[in-house]
Structure formats: structure tokens, C-alpha cells
Amino acid sequence: MAKAAFLRLQRIVVDGLFGTYNHDIKLNLHDRVTLLHGPNGVGKTVILGMINALLREQLGYFGRIPFLRFILFFDDGSKLKLEANNDSTGDDQRFLLELTRNGDSRSSTVGLAFRAAVIAERVEYLRPHGDLAHTWIDLRDGEQLSAWEVLSRYADSVPPAENRDDDLSWFSDFLKNANGHFIQAQRLVRMDSEHRDSYGYIGRSRTPSMISTVVEYSHDFRKQLADTMVRYGRQSQALDQSFPQRLIEAVDELEVAELQVRMSKLDKKTADYTEMGILDTTPTHPFSASSLGQIDHTQARVMTLYVQDTEKKLQALGDFATRTRLLLENVNRKYRHKRIQLDREKGFVATSDSGQPLLLNSLSSGEQQELLLHYDLLFRVPSNTIVLIDEPELSLHVAWQKKFLPDLLGIVQLSNFDALVATHSPFVVGDRTDLMIGLGG
């Protein structure tokens, strides 16, 4: 059976948000960026959170949000709806989840209390309260947890298939082709309060620590670079080992002029990769593009195979190098008297104009925001995804705010995703009011 195509989110409808607002948001699928603009309190951030929660099956998120119905429309004509049950309240709240697709409809009732109970059974130190319904006791310190608190603390650690009250396999199957990625407003640090109990489920520590996101992303970048170099090494080794046999069988023979052009391009590319830090040193070869002159047929076949192999080797670095170059260019053209560079052992490194090393988490909040946003968009977002970005203007100077949208539009085309951005800033919107949807008048 052919794999279903990835779905693009086309429209969002939310009725009765906070008991006040009805929003109908049509995404710009041509330019692939839609800007939500409006005053505080109209639900921009909450709408992003609702989209993210529904696409990740985190239905407990909806337990504390007053709304009537929430509907996602996709480009294949399918519709996913979550509707509040007005007869249920508090921790016993229930929702009707419904999917309409290809003329068929599937639905299930989702109860938050039931989901909390299933999750609590998998956390070794939680026990049901003997007297209070929908309440659990943390045996470590006697804390009483509501169904909402159980869901918010532990839902991520339990696979959706294990915490549903009805058969929602149809829901999970649908979401396999509808990806979401949420870049929240709180980006500079995150609370690390997770630990795993004896069953392997993630719990919460009593002594959470703060983790610098820019340092964490630097480590992630180092790992991605290492993985890329492993692929490059494997490709190089496979080609080098088979080179003699393929040379004996070789029949391709490029003209001297073509060889010179392609070798010049390879020399430039390898020098570029070395300057970025992806390659430790520029690979050397015994041939010079400028001194080929007249060569015989045997030499031409050797040179042709060498050029073809080198091109294949560098293909393993191509996408990573393109993204790295774009990140460094976009970030460094904004930084003053300092720059970000790539380091094979450390990930990102920051240096002053004089070459003095700087701690990443000593960068200003705006400098960190700029690096985090670009890294997230270029290296952490899968293709065919709806990216939800909350308040990209945080800590950014007006000049940097004005550059955000052009940068984003370029990254979108490279990475092939759609973006829905919630912003208060007219400088982020700039002259692209055609991409803007105003909420709340």
C-alpha cells in the first residue's frame, strides 16, 4: 500500500474561545507563512498551543481552556474537530473528537479523568485518593494531584495508545501524516525536572534544574555534525574501496574543458566546507584543474571517475553545509563585534572580533534568541511540518525584527515547511500585510 501524502494545515477555526472569541484563520499556502497579529488576550498563543496539542494527541491541554469547538482543515479536504461537552466540567471534562475524511466520519468521546487514571497507573509513586474523586496522591511527599496536574506532568511519558479511553487508532493513524513543531515564547532556558521511574516512564524531580537552550542546541549541533561526518566517511570508504575495479570497467570520459569546470567547482566547495569547519582540512589531490592541458584517453577516464566520486562524497555533506552556511550568514550579519563559528568538538563557539572565546550563554538575550530561532528552523524541523512560532520578536532590536520575516521565507523554501507565527510586532509584519491575519479587531 502506498504511503499517504503528508497533509498541510489549511484552515483553523475556534469557536467560543474564552467564551468570547470566534476565529477563522486561513493559512497562506502559497508563500507558506501566515502571521497572526493582534492585541494581548485574543488567543494567539493559545491557538498555537491548541494546534500543537491536537497534532501531538495531548488532549489534556484542552482541559483548562474555555472553548466550544476547535477544527483543523487540511489540504486533502479532511477535517479534525474537537468539541467540548457542555455537560461535563472540571477534571471530569469530556470532549467529542471527530475526523471527517473522504466522505467517512469517525468519532470518539475522550474523557480527561480516564486518561489521567491510566497514566497514573504507570507512575509508581502515584495512588488514587481514597476520598476525593479524580485525585491522586504522590507517595513521596503526600502532594494531591488533580487529573489536570497528572496529565500536564506525565502525559508526555506515556504512549498515546496506552492512555486513551476509546479506540483512537484512527486518530493516531491520521496524525502520522500531519506534523507539528512548536517554538514557544520561552526559548532561552527550560526546566529539566524529568527522571525515569523503574517502569521507564518520565516523572518529575523535586529539584528541577535550569538548562540553557543555546548550550543544549550547541551539543545537538555537534551530534548532527558528527552523524553527517559518519555518513561522509562511509560514502568515501565505499567509493575508495571499489575505485580500482570501477576504474578497470570505466567507459565515461569527460572533455578537458568539462573536467576543468567541475574540478574548479569541487575545489571551491571543499575549501568552503573547510572554512566553515565541516572539514578539518581541504582534501588534496594530484590533479590541477588549471594544468590539465592535453591528456590521453586513459588519463581522461581516471580524471572523470575521480571527479564523479568526489562529487558523490561531498553530496553527503551538501544539505548540512547549506543549512550551516545559511545559519552562520543570517546570524553573523546581525551580531556586532562577535561571531558564531562551527567547531567539530564543541558545536557552536562564539568569539569576539579579537578572537577571544565567549561563553554561549553569556551572549545577550537577543543574540541567543536569534541563534536559537535559526537553529531550530534549520536543523530541528522536519520537512512537511506546520511550524508554530510564538513571539519571534522577543528581545530583538527593531532592525532584527524587520529581518525576521525575510529570513523565515528563505528558510521555508529550503526546508519545505509551513509556518504560523503569532506576533505583536508591526516590524515583523513590515510591508507583507498580505501574509497577516488580524485577530480581535
Image (cartoon, helix red, strand yellow):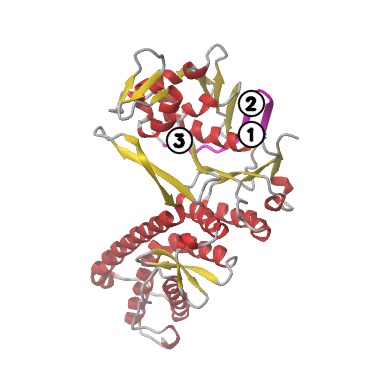
Q: Which residue is drawn at 28% across and 62% down?
A: 234
Three-letter residue code for mark 3:
Ala
Q: Where is residue 270 in the image (x, y as percent from the top left)?
A: 42, 73
User: What span is colored magenta in the figure?
Assistant: 3-25
Where disc 2 sits, the SS reads loop
Q: Where is residue 271 in the image (x, y as percent from the top left)?
A: 44, 76
Instruction: Indicate whether 94 appears above or below 384.
Output: above
The residue pinned by badge 2 equals 18
Three-letter residue code for mark 1:
Gly
**What is the CA distance from the residue labelled 1 to the residue labelled 2?**
8 Å
- The answer to whether mark 3 and mark 1 are in CB contact below 8 A is no
Q: Where is residue 53 in the image (x, y as percent from the top left)?
A: 50, 33
Q: Where is residue 339 in the image (x, y as percent from the top left)?
A: 52, 69
Residue 206 shows up from this direction: yes
The residue pinned by badge 1 equals 43
Residue 13 magenta: yes
The residue pinned by badge 3 equals 4
* Viewer-nearest of discs 3 and 2: 2
* Viewer-nearest of discs 3 and 1: 1
- In terms of sequence position, does the residue under pointer 3 or pointer 1 come before the other? 3
Three-letter residue code for mark 2:
Phe
Instruction: Indicate whether 343 appears above or below 72.
Output: below
